[in-house]
Image (cartoon, rainbow, N blue to C red):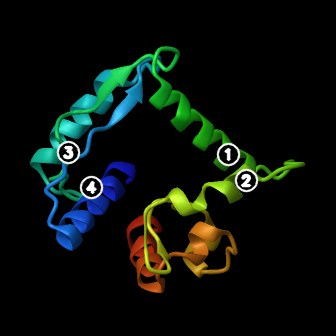
Amino acid sequence: MLLNKFDVMLKRIRSHSALDNRGLVIHDRRVVAERDIQDWTKEWRKAAGTVGQLRNLADVPLFADSRASRLIQAADLVSYALYRHYDPDRQGVDYAENIWSAFDSDGDSLHGAVHFTPYFVGGTCGCRPCLGRPAKSRVGWRQRALPD
């Protein structure tokens, strides 16, 4: 799902600005699933499935040690801010409030962050990613994710 969102963002940028960008996915090397992720990406590039075909990636994901990469450390900070935003025991500053504007969006629709929760399907979750999703995308997600 995440790679598909990234691919769709690159496609939208290309169609709006005529820039033929390709995306690069960089993942923390310390994760044991490196081989699986690379294999999945190769398969996704070949055959469309429930995720959709990835057409805008420059290559298979690259892996780097987060201790040596400031870019991955920055991604860790974003992840931590989002984790804290949804943590029910959170106290103090909501770091996510400072970064929502950096997520991919188109008008009032927030595409770069998706909150997967049962409330997302019903449209009753009041968080920024859920409120920023068009109603038609919630219906499509329900059909794919929740069997009858």
In three-dimensional space, the C-alpha distance between marks 4 and 2, rounded to whole angstroms, equals: 26 Å
> Which circle's residue, 1 or 3, is located before the other in the chain?
3
Q: Which residue is mark 2?
A: 85
28 or 124, which is in the foreground? Answer: 28
- Residue 86 x/y as whole percent: 72, 54
Please name the amino acid that badge 1 sits on.
Answer: Ala
74 or 49, which is in the foreground? Answer: 74
Q: Which residue is mark 1?
A: 81
> Which circle's residue, 3 or 2, is located before the other in the chain?
3
- Residue 59 x/y as whole percent: 17, 35
**Dot 3 crowding, Cα within 10 Å, few <14, some 14–19, many 20+:** some
Q: Quadrant of residue 97?
A: bottom right
Q: Is residue 103 above or below residue 39?
A: below
Q: Which residue is mark 4?
A: 7
19 left or right of 84? Answer: left
> Which circle's residue, 4 or 3, is located before the other in the chain?
4
In three-dimensional space, the C-alpha distance between marks 1 and 3, rounded to whole angstroms, equals: 26 Å
Q: Residue 99 has which mark?
A: none
Q: Quadrant of residue 105?
A: bottom left
